Image (cartoon, coloured by chain):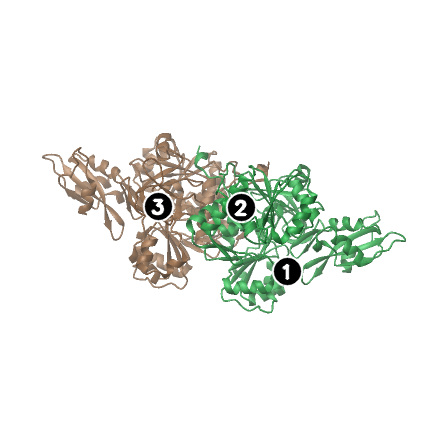
Chain colours: A brown, B green
Amino acid sequence: MSEAWEAPLTPTAFLDRSALVFAERTAVIDGDLRFTYRQFHDRCERLAGALIARGVNPGDRVAVLAPNNRIPLEAHNGVPKAAAVLVAMNYRLAPAELAHIVSHSGARTLIYDHMFADVAAALLELVEHEVDAIEANGPGDDYEAMLAAATPAAVPVADERAMLALNYTSGTTGQPKGVIYRHRGAYLNALAGAYHAKLDTSSVFLWTLPMFHCNGWCYTWGVTAAGATHLCLPHVDSSEIWRLMTQEGVTHFNGAPTVLTMVAYDPAAEPVARTIEIATGGAPPSPAILERMAELNMNVTHLYGLTETYGPATICEWQPEWDALPIAEQARVKARQGVGWVTSQPARVVDGAGNDVAPNAEQMGEIALRGNSLMAGYYKDAAATEKAVPDGWFRTGDLAVMHPDGYVEIRDRSKDIIISGGENIASIEVEQTIAGHSAVLEVAVIARPDEKWGEVPVAYVALKPGAAATEVDIIEHVRDRIAHYKAPKSVIFGELPKTSTGKVQKYVLRDGV
Amino acid sequence: MSEAWEAPLTPTAFLDRSALVFAERTAVIDGDLRFTYRQFHDRCERLAGALIARGVNPGDRVAVLAPNNRIPLEAHNGVPKAAAVLVAMNYRLAPAELAHIVSHSGARTLIYDHMFADVAAALLELVEHEVDAIEANGPGDDYEAMLAAATPAAVPVADERAMLALNYTSGTTGQPKGVIYRHRGAYLNALAGAYHAKLDTSSVFLWTLPMFHCNGWCYTWGVTAAGATHLCLPHVDSSEIWRLMTQEGVTHFNGAPTVLTMVAYDPAAEPVARTIEIATGGAPPSPAILERMAELNMNVTHLYGLTETYGPATICEWQPEWDALPIAEQARVKARQGVGWVTSQPARVVDGAGNDVAPNAEQMGEIALRGNSLMAGYYKDAAATEKAVPDGWFRTGDLAVMHPDGYVEIRDRSKDIIISGGENIASIEVEQTIAGHSAVLEVAVIARPDEKWGEVPVAYVALKPGAAATEVDIIEHVRDRIAHYKAPKSVIFGELPKTSTGKVQKYVLRDGV
């Protein structure tokens, strides 16, 4: 009866509210630039108006290739305010990979930072359809002039289940898949993030986490919901992080454990006056880092999720009585992926038949998730969607146990993903690239634990009879073709261990690293 | 495409989550009884099972008449888990008023506390349909036996727009109207409340606010969402409040300014060790009380809303720089009703034609609200719904100005409501009751400021020629017919001032009080 006076759930509503409530407070700090919420809102609506004027229609995809500065932040609101779909791209990808994303998403608009002008030029050469490319920053900046000339616009959201964003996976297979986010799911996950982090208008959120990662785990909108300050960080650099923490009064940041390590062991590291709240994910934080962070007066919360779940879906919700545990025990507990967060459905661990495993911390199964912040599917890939969500529950590919207290803990990954510096690397993609080298007979890529990156890829290669290749040859071969961070850190030559049926025994290789 | 794996928004999901995540933590303290979240969840699902076993069908209304103890708290989850609709009734109403609510809502089940056994018996005599009455507490307790014997049940919510609760207004006219709440709106408002109050599992929420008031402003569910402790308070008594604050470590409570006054000036009042967060509403807190609360280390947040908006819809969002203002100035700012809270649409102030007034803190208009937490309408009263929400915006009846910074401030009420001790009293209802006295010719009831209650009703009565009645006669006449708190505190006899068209000039009377 009252749909007429309901409001569709959309994360851009948070910006509208903060522009009203926190009009004169600082919304965005991007280097020397500072924008109030009133200005930030105006800039986002100008971006929407500019996009519409350039021919962007409702539902069109708009790709963004930029570091963590105001460009993607504004796109997170400006693109949806044009009723368009945001495709925030991983700038570490190679031009061919980016071109695939632009082609597959059908984005006809690309906003790129001058920093990536060469990459943008290279990718655009590989895309067959016409793309309206807009350069931001640098000497040839079009972006600011475009905003200045634009008429602000905001297309009302008619359907909260309309597509909001496409986020391309880098994880489960060689070819990235476009994960569909909707307004409703992003609204709810952004609100949950603001709630759990207790963000408010006095918070200063440092953008160590890439905004292209699940839309910055939806904190692009969650920080705005709180009327807090977005403190941009285009390059993750620990001395810059320490400078900003001191000078700008950072209260929160999010990042993979590798970022925490970088911060914790920077020469400038010293205990901070006011506790800094940190959310980490991508890999469990180690006891050593947790201990170190505690010394620095930084409180770490462990989150878990995937691109398919709008970023965080679970939280290692901290029980007050755990404060009394020895630090090593605290770390052991905090390494668990935990329980669904406040807007999530309970996480499950299921066996091959889709039944819950026993909650005994022993029986392994696959983490299965569902709820409002589960993707609406893979873009143009119904078969992959069906495979990933066979029965309404998304199979994460992460093998885990269920503890008796309902907390999930990952024990292994089923899909051969290497997580290096917070980035997912599909071993199969690296293997396929190496296999393309003329001298290679067969190859297996596995993860090696690494103090700095968490994990790094290592390749085991058997060469063709009579063929020759060096470690450097193989690494260069990979770096020429896919993102540099996916290249193996070392290459070991020799025969690969196999099962009687000829399958490579990766676990044997893993035992050797 | 993915509705299949979405979860309908329902506030009972918060209980399900907390039963998993905070299983062994204290959910409810009700006198000597303490229940963990596991137990609380089990009890609520037993209540659902018991109701179903007694013949409650999906959509049936279940009325509750109980003080702030475990009974209404459990009903807030158990009734919706039976797919039924909760009708939490104001226990201060007279039997005839309660009977009207039971009759109008068609509730065929009534759960009542032994404390109100006489009232329940009286109201049941006035209801024409059959009612299954369940007594809780006291010597004839059926409730605990019923739970013990029940099979837990939880009917999945199929539609987040299904009816969750009916809350009867006491404000705008003599006859209460049943405000329809839906699962979706309550979920969002509960989450917003938990966010703004920064509730978490270490919070202890003291139930000074009646749970029958807009379902306790949706904190019945919001406190549960946080895994915090519900500390029941069946009687609002300031020495008991101080005892509980000290012994149970209260962190939060909500209530009308009269409750704050009672707490602040209790003989036991002294500064608390840890800041207590208080949300107040119903009337703006006075400078004196704010100053006193600050001395006691209690932080007051001013909320505003109505039954029609699921309780709070706006918040006087505090800007950090206001901390530097003199206390009197802080109080002046905090008296404003503020801005929409995080899940709300922006509040408007509109003129008679439905256009926004100028945001100049001068032009008066009526506060207009809409959004997900606006009622789905008045139950069985489409005409009243249409009148209250003529154009998709609910007219609150509160006359206000819009400040240049977007904050709303009430300057008068358009509908002659007297707010006494946080309860709305419709002057028209009191007038009609007094007019029923055989000696009364005409009557006008207005509010008189009162130190303890905020406002109290005062009656101006003109007697029929030759007829006689005393002040006590009139007051007793009212007390015999409607809730005692609605009776005038004093009666002044004489001719009523009128306009040339014969309308009583209430403003003249108000000038005299």
Pick the residue in front: A351 or B258.
Answer: A351
**Front position in the image: A167 or A112:** A167
| Residue located farthest toward the left when viewing the structure as drawn | A466
Which residue is the site of mark 3?
A359
Secondary element type, mark 3? loop
Q: Residue furthest right?
A: B466
Q: Is residue B175 left or right of residue A100?
A: right
Q: Chain of mark 3?
A: A
**Rendered position, B217 above or below B266:** above
Could you tell me residue B26's position as x and y percent? Answer: 46, 55
Question: In the image, which is nearer the foreground, mark 1 or mark 3?
Answer: 3
Q: CA distance from mark 1 to mark 3?
A: 50 Å
Question: Can the viewer see residue A19?
Answer: no
Horizontal and vertical percent position of residue B314: 58, 51
At which x and y percent is residue B503? 81, 48
At label 3, counting other C-alpha atoms closer than 10 Å, the crowd grade (few under 14, some 14-19, many 20 or more) is: some
Tell me the subunit letter for badge 2. B
In front: mark 2 or mark 3? 2
Disc 3 marks a residue whose amino acid type is Pro
> Which numbered disc covers residue B146?
2
Q: Secondary structure at mark 2?
A: helix
Mark 1 or mark 2: which comes first in sequence?
Answer: 2
Report in which chain the residue with disc 1 lies: B
**Mark 1 → mark 2, Cα distance in angstroms:** 37 Å
Three-letter residue code for mark 2: Met
What residue is pinned by disc 1?
B258
* Residue located at (59% from left, 62% from top): B330
What percent of the width, then of the height, locates residue A144? Answer: 44, 45
